[in-house]
Image (cartoon, helix red, strand yellow):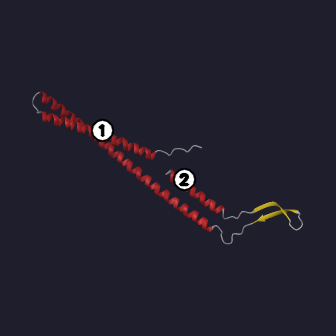
Amino acid sequence: MAAADADLAIADAGVQLAKSQRVPDVTVGPALRRLEVSKDIAAVFSVSIPIPLFNSGRAAVAQASAERSRAEAQRRMTALDVEQAITDAQAEADNAATTARNASGPALVAAQEAARIARVGYREGKFGQLDLLDAERTLADTRVAAIDALASYQNAKARLQRLTAPAPEQGN
């Protein structure tokens, strides 16, 4: 967004420059001239006023105005893109938070309890080794899913913060 604002400011400056160049520059100045016939030196005072007959600067102003319009449209488009990205990031963060809560909550507790029961049952001979391994694998998969969900939530939150953080100030 800051880059689009800078482009618009540059385009505004271009319009002002083109408008300022429409006014002819009056040149006034003294000079010395040597006269060939009499070998004398004469002081001359000159005034130069350009008359814009064929180039009134309209084309340069029109081009600069068109460039400003393009920069303004680009800025509006960038603003919409940034707004959409922020909305997407907010939705992604909300969804990731819900997924993380669900993965870390009842599902993880149930997998831990199932693994505990399988361990106790295996020790007492009520369950076979395959039942114990299945319960442990389910617990490990649930933990991995919970960790992945928390990582996705943190990444989504960081993306949202990057998009909503103010642009750094330019130091002189």
Say whether residue 107 is visible: no
Q: Secondary structure at mark 2?
A: helix
Q: Position of residue 41 (x, y in %)?
A: 87, 62
Horizontal and vertical percent for residue 45? 82, 63
Determine which residue is flagged by label 2: 6
Name the side, left or right, on which 41 lies relative to 114.
Answer: right
Image point (38%, 43%), residue name: 157
The quarter in which the C terminus is drawn is top right
Task: Judge whether 44 appears above or below 101 on screen.
Answer: below
Real-space Cα distance between discs 2 and 1? 42 Å
Q: Using a 10 Å C-alpha cutoff, classify the residue at mark 1 as few (fewer than 14 neighbours), some (14 to 19) or many (20 or more).
A: some
**Which kind of residue does numbered mark 2 sit on?**
Ala
Looking at this view, is 28 or 33 the one in front? 33
Secondary structure type for disc 1: helix
Tell me where residue 9 appears, x and y as whole percent.
57, 55
Q: Is residue 144 above or below residue 69?
A: above
Q: Give coordinates of residue 35: x percent, y percent.
A: 86, 65
Q: Is residue 102 left or right of residue 166?
A: left
Quarter of the image where one finds residue 59:
bottom right
Q: Is residue 14 left or right of residue 160?
A: right
Q: Residue at x 51, y 52 (%)?
A: 3
Which residue does the numbered mark 1 point to in the structure image? 147
- Residue 47 against residue 98 in the figure, above or below: below
Structural crowding at the residue carrying mark 2, measured as other residues with C-alpha within 10 Å and reported as few (<14), some (14–19) or many (≥20): few
The residue depicted at 57 percent of the width and 58 percent of the height is: 11
Q: Which mark is residue 86?
A: none
Q: Amino acid at mark 1?
A: Ile
